[in-house]
Amino acid sequence: MKQAAKQWLGAAGSWWQLGAEATLVVPLRLARIASGGEAAKAEAELMVSEKCKAHGALLRDLGSGLLGSSLPQIAGGVAKHYLGLVRANRKRLFQDMFGMK
């Protein structure tokens, strides 16, 4: 298999993982926000601040070339960047809501 095809398959796998993690995080966050009160407010504020920080870090990494130089490297790097953050949220939310990781 050609190197570019392998890189695109790797990037696609990272995007698939990101989608799978996000399908767990979104309903957990929505449940927390829908419950109202201070916990809901704190979750909403955390969500917005995390998104701003994540976007800034991604722009920094893109601009410095840390994600690679080819399109498949960059695509995979973007997915991995967000995957780590989404996975951390999934673990935190599962721990808070169900006492498990």
Image (spheres, rainbow, N blue to C red):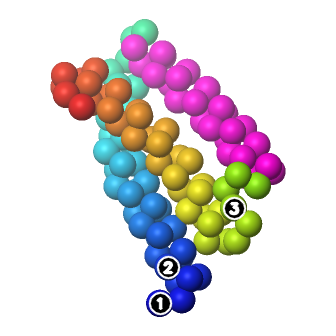
Q: How many marks?
A: 3
Vertical order, 33 against 6 (above or below):
above
Amino acid type at circle 3 is Gly
- Residue 30 seen by the camera: no
Spatial separation of the CA atoms under disc 3 and disc 2 = 15 Å
Quarter of the picture holding the C terminus = top left
Between residue 40 and residue 67, name the one nearer to us: 67
Circle on res. 1: 1
Q: Mark 1: which secondary structure? A: loop
Residue 53 position within the rendered picture, expressed as x and y whole percent measured from the top left: 65, 32
Q: Give the range drawn in magenta.
A: 39-64
Between residue 29 and residue 10, name the one nearer to us: 10
* Residue that label 2 marks: 6
* Residue that label 3 marks: 68
Q: Residues within 10 Å of mark 2 (few under 14, many from 20)?
A: few
Q: Is the magenta stretch mostly helix, strand or loop?
A: helix
Name which of mark 1 and mark 3 comes first in the sequence: 1
- Residue sitting at x 62%, y 66%: 73
Name which of mark 3 and mark 2 comes first in the sequence: 2
Taking the magenta stretch, the answer to whether it contains residue 1 is no
Residue 22 position within the rendered picture, expressed as x and y whole percent measured from the top left: 40, 48
